[in-house]
Image (cartoon, rainbow, N blue to C red):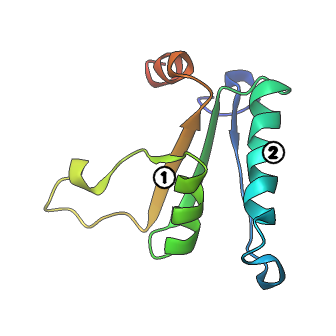
Amino acid sequence: ERFGYNHRQCAIGFAFVDKYRGTGLPFRTVQYFQEFLFRKMDRLYLFATVKRENRRSIAFLKKLGFEERYPEEDQDTNEEPPEELFLEKYRSSQARGRIRNY
């Protein structure tokens, strides 16, 4: 088991609701939730998968500090890019080293 509770990792998901667009509420809510996971639930690592064409969600996650795990420039130019993008966020640089070296 590489992911999951025992490895102090967590996947997050969300949906945009037009009613709250432009209010900042979705950003603050997810920001609070990720801090709760890092501090209270002792998670070290959060990740999300997003359809590559879903630029709105990708921008939202990047604004929250998530980074692409496999950026396009790291991929073989002869391969088709995957349909989904994998984004991640670590609690700290120490957590990044521990998980990536697992």
Q: For the point 74% across and 41% down, which residue is it?
A: 34
- Residue 61 x/y as whole percent: 58, 56
Q: For the point 52% across and 54% down, which residue is it?
A: 62
Q: For the point 56% across and 20% down, which residue is it?
A: 95
Camera-side residue of 47 and 40? 40
34 up-or-down from 49: above or below: above
Outermost residue on the front side: it is 23
Which mark is nearer the camera, 2 or 1?
A: 2
Q: Describe residue 80's horizontal placement relative to residue 16 as left or right.
A: left
Residue named by callout 2: 33
Q: State which quadrant residue 78 falls in.
A: bottom left
Q: Describe residue 69's horizontal placement relative to residue 88 as left or right.
A: left
Residue named by callout 1: 86
12 up-or-down from 45: above or below: below
- Residue 39 x/y as whole percent: 79, 25
Outermost residue on the bottom side: it is 18
Q: Is mark 2 on a helix, strand or loop?
A: helix
Question: Residue flagged by tag 2: what amino acid is it?
Answer: Phe
Q: In which quarter of the image is the N terminus?
A: top right
Camera-side residue of 78 and 69? 69
Question: Residue flagged by tag 1: what amino acid is it?
Answer: Phe
Q: What element carries label 1?
A: strand
Q: For the point 73% across and 74% down, which residue is it?
A: 16
